[in-house]
Image (cartoon, grey):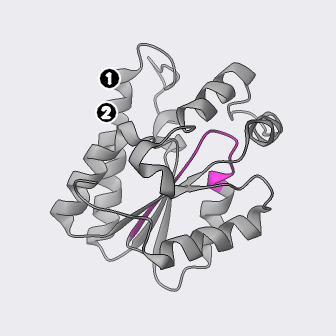
Amino acid sequence: MSNVLLLTGPSGSGKTTVARLVATDAPGPTMHLTTDEFYRGIRTGFVAPYLPGAEHQNEVVVDAIVAAVAAYARGGYDVVVDGVIGPWFLPPFRAAAAEGKWSMSYVVLRPDLGTTLRRGQARPEPELTDVDALTGLHGAFAELGALEPHALDSTRLDVTQTAVQVREAVASGSYLLTASG
């Protein structure tokens, strides 16, 4: 496993469950950092991160997440980060990885829309279950441009199979990100 794994995809793709397995079965000290908790901690003035008007909040939250990841990486921990980390949020992670000299892999879980909706709507509160929001987030990961090779179709995989695929993807080295690309 690389030093930091950004495990992402739309809500309902299985990120948190898979990340928990990957982190729990890691060979060394590993932190599972769930980005949702950084958003849930905002008690007053919270704006759902996918809504217009959330840009400033999202920048602040991403900066806090990056700082936490960097602290754990500096302390010698591998970090498995799960959350909606689209390509638009990668620059601060890349800058911190370059500065901290830690490696970083980027894996996008991308089940088909039907699977995403089924999984997303089956989750308990406070998880996002709104069909329009789930569909929009799925669409945000539909075209990754240069990062398309980082997508893993988990439509037909169960949680254990997906975790195995993620570990293999990271071990291959082909999911590594650099400071520039």
Q: What stretch is highlighted in magenta?
A: 4-16
For image coordinates 69% across by 33% down, the residue present is: 126
Amino acid type, callout 2? Val
Residue highlighted by disc 1: 56
Where 179 falls versus 79 (above or below)? above
Magenta stretch encompasses residue 15: yes
In which quarter of the view is residue 142 placed?
A: top right
Residue that sits furthest to the bottom in the current view: 27
The percent position of residue 26, horizontal first and vertical second, equals 55, 79
Asked which secondary structure carries label 2, the reply is helix
Where 158 falls versus 41 (above or below)? below
For image coordinates 38% across by 74% down, the residue present is: 77
The percent position of residue 106, horizontal first and vertical second, equals 45, 58
Amino acid type, callout 1? His
Which mark, by number, is residue 60?
2
From the image, which quarter does the C terminus lie in? bottom left
Q: Check disc 2: other Cα within 10 Å, few if <14, some if 14-19, many if 20+.
A: few
Residue 150 visible from this viewpoint: yes
